[in-house]
Image (tube, rainbow, N blue to C red):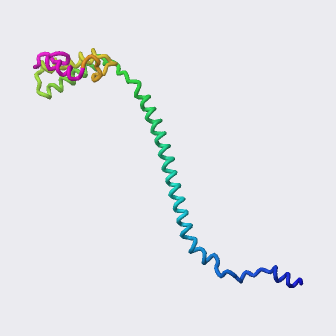
């Protein structure tokens, strides 16, 4: 009886009752495994793109908010010193001479430029005058109003 029990308990690794093993199953399972891994890779890529787009849009909003805050405080340009006004006057005179204008007309233009710079309000921007529209300024200059150079037609 002990011999029979030993024989039943003994492993028989060399016998394969079904007739196939891992070597035969691997080619059948490999395409299914490949498709599953490919789909998992696609899902992972889609999720990464979605998370990245949400993160980048949040980052973009933060950057735009900071830029807007910086832009809200306009820079104040200090008035020109006497030396700077003289330098601008000289530069306008030189440019008028190079353009072929008479010395008298060049001097009047330079005086007008320096006077305009000296009298300008540092908080006022030329394009933001509430009392005049851009077309009105052009019409006034053509008729000899503000911005008109005396002695010039």
Please state which of residues 113 and 42 is positioned toward the viewer in this rendering. Answer: 42
Q: 59 left or right of 86? A: right
Q: Position of residue 93 (x, y in %)?
A: 18, 23
Q: Is residue 53 above or below residue 150?
A: below
Please state which of residues 142 and 23 is positioned toward the viewer in this rendering. Answer: 23
Residue drawn at point x = 55 percent, y = 63 percent = 36
Residue drawn at point x = 55 percent, y = 68 percent = 32
Q: Position of residue 131 (x, y in %)?
A: 27, 16
Q: Is residue 59 above or below residue 84?
A: below
Q: Is residue 72 magenta?
A: no
Q: Which residue appears farthest toward the front when viewing the image?
A: 18
Image quarter in which the C terminus is found:
top left
Q: Which residue appears farthest toward the right when viewing the image?
A: 1
Q: Quadrant of residue 94?
A: top left
Residue drawn at point x = 15 percent, y = 25 percent = 96
Q: Position of residue 139 (x, y in %)?
A: 17, 20
Q: 62 left or right of 15? A: left
State the extent of the magenta-drawn residues as a range. Answer: 133-153
Q: Is residue 142 magenta?
A: yes
Q: Quadrant of residue 70?
A: top left
């Amino acid at each position: 009886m002990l011999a029979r029990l030993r024989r039943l308990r003994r492993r028989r690794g060399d016998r394969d009752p079904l007739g196939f093993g891992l070597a035969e199953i691997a080619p059948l399972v490999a395409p299914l495994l490949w498709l599953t891994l490919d789909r998992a890779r696609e899902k992972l890529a889609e999720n990464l793109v979605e998370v990245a787009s949400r993160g980048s849009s949040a980052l973009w909003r933060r950057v735009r908010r900071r830029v807007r805050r910086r832009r809200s405080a306009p820079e104040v340009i200090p008035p020109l010193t006497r030396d700077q006004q003289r330098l601008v006057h000289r530069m306008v005179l030189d440019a008028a001479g190079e353009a072929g204008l008479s010395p008298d007309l060049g001097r009047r233009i330079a005086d007008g430029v320096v006077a305009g710079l000296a009298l300008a309000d540092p908080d006022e921007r030329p394009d933001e005058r509430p009392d005049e529209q851009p077309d009105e300024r052009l019409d006034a200059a053509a008729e000899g109003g503000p911005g008109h150079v005396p002695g010039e037609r």
